[in-house]
Image (cartoon, rainbow, N blue to C red):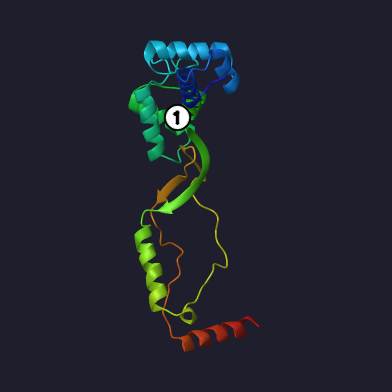
Amino acid sequence: MARTFSEDLKWRIIYLHHDGYSRIKIGILLHISKRTVDNILQIYVQWRTVVNPWQKPPGRHKILIQNEMKILRELVKDKVDWYLDELVGELEQQTGKLVSIPTLWRSLVYCGISRKKLHQAVYEQNELLRSIFIAKVGRDYKPEQLIFMDEAFKDERTLSRRYGYSLKNTFAIKKNAFSLQNIIAVDIMERKKFLKILLFQMWFLK
């Protein structure tokens, strides 16, 4: 596979050439061949840039054009937890073009989209209200007034999917409606009443 060079390195060739360095000296300084230096200087002389604006992207011809790639990105953004076959069907509905699952996977990679573990979030989640609540608790309550509870058991069984797709270096987040199923009732009680109930539970468990 041919080596690829960044635009920053190509522009450095141009700067060194303007500073009076020979093409051989530039190749030695940047650890590249003289032929590469000649090609980049030729492109610059012809187009006044270091990248040929008429050069086609490498690789085989893409089945999905740019507009269809854009539709695919928006589809993955909206349906983050869909399976590949579901994406194929929906993409056919929107573009009229049926592609195979391997082709769809290569298109996702081309768009910079990868498969990763899904992060669950609720629609009602509000970071501003959460910060206000934390500030209110810290201002209006003392540490001895707070009681922390943890689940004795948590059911891991769920209908939600565990994996989804999103752009590289980003989380795949699926927002779900908050459910009140299996939530126990909460009551505010005085400390004496709470201690009385706690002692009764401890005596009952003996």
Query: Could you tell me residue 24's position as x and y percent?
Result: 57, 13
**With respect to residue 143, does 120 lie above or below?**
above
**With respect to residue 162, does 184 lie above or below?**
below
Rendered residue at 41%/58% (across/down): 179
Which secondary structure lies at badge 1?
Answer: loop
Q: Quadrant of the N terminus?
A: top right
Res 177 visible:
yes
The foreground one among 8 and 137 is 8
Please, what is the three-letter code of the amino acid marked with disc 1? Cys
Query: Could you tell me residue 94's position as x and y percent?
Result: 33, 28
Q: Residue furthest right?
A: 206
Res 2 visible:
no
Rendered residue at 46%/37% (across/down): 167
**With respect to residue 12, does 145 lie above or below?**
below
Rendered residue at 37%/72% (across/down): 136
Which residue lies under the disc numbered 1?
111
Q: Is residue 105 left or right of residue 140?
A: right
Label tally: 1
